[in-house]
Amino acid sequence: MQKYSIFNLVKNAFSNHQNWDLAWKDPTPKEEYDVVIIGGGGHGLATAYYLAKEHNITKVAIIEKGWIGGGNVGRNTTIIRSNYMHDENGLFSEFGMDLWRKMSQDLNYNVMFSPRGIINLAHSDAQMNAYARRGNSMRLNGIDAVLLNREQVKEIIPMADFSDNVRFPIFGGLMQPSAGTARHDAVAWGYARQADSMGVDIIQNCEVIGFDVSAGKINGIRTSRGNIKAKKVGLCVAGSTNILAEKLNMTLPIETHLLQACVSEPIKPVLDNVVTFGAGHFYVSQSDKGEMVMGGDLDGYNSYAQRGNLPTLQHVLTEGIAMMPFLSKLKMLRTWGGIMDMSMDGSPIIDKTHIEGLYLNCGWCYGGFKATPASGWTFAHTIAQDRVHELNAGYSLNRFSTGHLIDEKGLGTKTWIS
Amino acid sequence: MLYINCPHCGMRSQNEFSYGGDASVKRPELNKEVSDQEWNNFVYNRKSLRGKHLELWQHISGCRQWIKVERDTATHEIFRTFKADEEVA
């Protein structure tokens, strides 16, 4: 594989950049693989990459219905954080933070990781207490957390509404300085390029139409481009999880819902953190292009539409304007939607299934993007070793029947208030 | 914007309604032994169909009645609505 470097950039400039290698190939599916990963999103690509890198398993195919980077990895709001209270989420996400910090070097691809900090705003004394508790839990798990008072928040984000006569005054906030953003497409492309270079077949425009299961063991998959034999199959398909589960006669604690995001017209730099509203569900950051990137609640009903509906967008942006009134002056540039695999406790599932050789990775709710490296790493471990790693042991499928839910903040298939 | 035909009030916008999830889920019978798996299925496990989906909505800013709505989860088209206790053929 051609390394991306300043020297290669200069060298290729002499040939008008016409001779760069393709970042990944377009192979036809082979008859058999050791591992087939269904879903060529961020998590699927990362899983294939870590299977090759950490476990030396390279007879791997990624089966993608659409194209690389066309699903949720290209539809999110690029936020990366580990500001969780529960050990399962905190330790898993902080492991991921470490992978994020090394990712550009590791993948030889600039993913533009920008640890600019995230601030969760508090709007009451009770919420400040809750944030102090969460901040302490985070610090016990080795995650950086700073509790800010009103004046400190005002210094960082003076454009927020600090006037006296507001419905939700800002009391302070909880900041994770090491959180941030990254270029989401670059993450998909970087993982795809490295996985491809280590021998992984990335097969696009190939839909899975069925599974070949006999005597409780997976033997392969049936696709729109023919049958493929596989010793192990990993499901990594986010909003399409229920559709594939139905083909396996599995019913999962997952509902598919629609989540929207939007960006404003680009403006001069004004916000150098990620900020979330504490009296509802709204978050905002500013992209390198200057657009204000915003998102919030689910549309609230089961949907596979990949496009949003106006009432929810209006509701979310009303919260945004309450938090930062200047947003009302901006024009909307784009809105879009993605379909989320909403789990019933708001936490993900990375586990084996009752079918031997079939592994499940789903339930990412609002937080799939930031989990990309940790999810890929632990899922690769679970597949390669046929047992869960301690980092994803809590993300089991049977926790719903045993009562070991990971209820971080009352988020799940239901919207915050509905 | 979805427009839902409330069987009690007529056609209203989605802003007046709150979503209540899959209407085909049945609570296990009370006077019978219920296994953990049955509870699990009732409380957590959902088919989340792509296509026609029978679901509960509450007309929360209207008559406050629960209703059933048959809706396509891929196109958002609404086919039929029913009262909560109405049998769906």
Image (spheres, coloured by chain):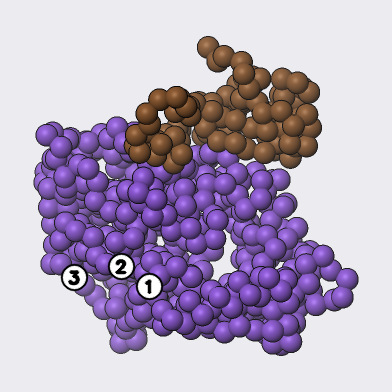
**SS under mark 1:** helix
View extreme (right): residue? A165
Q: Taking A149 as reference, is B36 above or below it?
A: above
* Disc 2 chain ID: A
Relative to residue A312, is residue A331 depicted above or below?
A: below
Kindly identify the residue that appears in the image at 35 percent across and 38 percent down. Answer: B36
Colour of chain A in the image: purple
Q: Amino acid at mark 1?
A: Leu
Q: Mark number for residue A91?
A: 1
* Residue A86 horizontal side relative to residue A12, left or right: right
How far apart marks 1 and 2 lie (CA) works out to 7 Å
Q: Which quadrant would residue A149 be assigned to in this image? A: bottom right
**Letter of the chain in brown:** B
Q: Which residue is mark 2?
A: A391
Q: Amino acid at mark 3?
A: Glu
**CB contact under 8 Å: marks 1 and 2:** yes
Q: As rendered, which of A129 and A336 lies closer to the eye? A: A129
Question: In this rendering, would A93 be left or right of A284?
Answer: left
Query: Counting residues from the N terminus, which is met first, the one under dot 1 or under dot 3?
Result: 3
Mark in front: 1 vs 3 = 1
Measured as percent of width and height from the top left, residue A63 is found at 27, 48
Using the rendered image of the protein, determine whether residue A214 is visible from the camera's viewpoint: yes
Of A65 and A374, nearer the camera is A374
Mark 3 belongs to chain: A
Chain ID for label 1?
A
Q: Which residue is mark 3?
A: A54
Q: SS class of the residue under badge 2?
A: helix
Taking the spot 48% from the left edge, 58% from the top edge, the residue there is A407
Q: Give the class, few, some or many, for how many residues have Cα within 10 Å of label 2's Cα (few <14, many ≥20).
A: many
Q: Position of residue A225 (x, y in %)?
A: 23, 38
Q: Nearer the viewer, residue B49 or A404?
A: A404
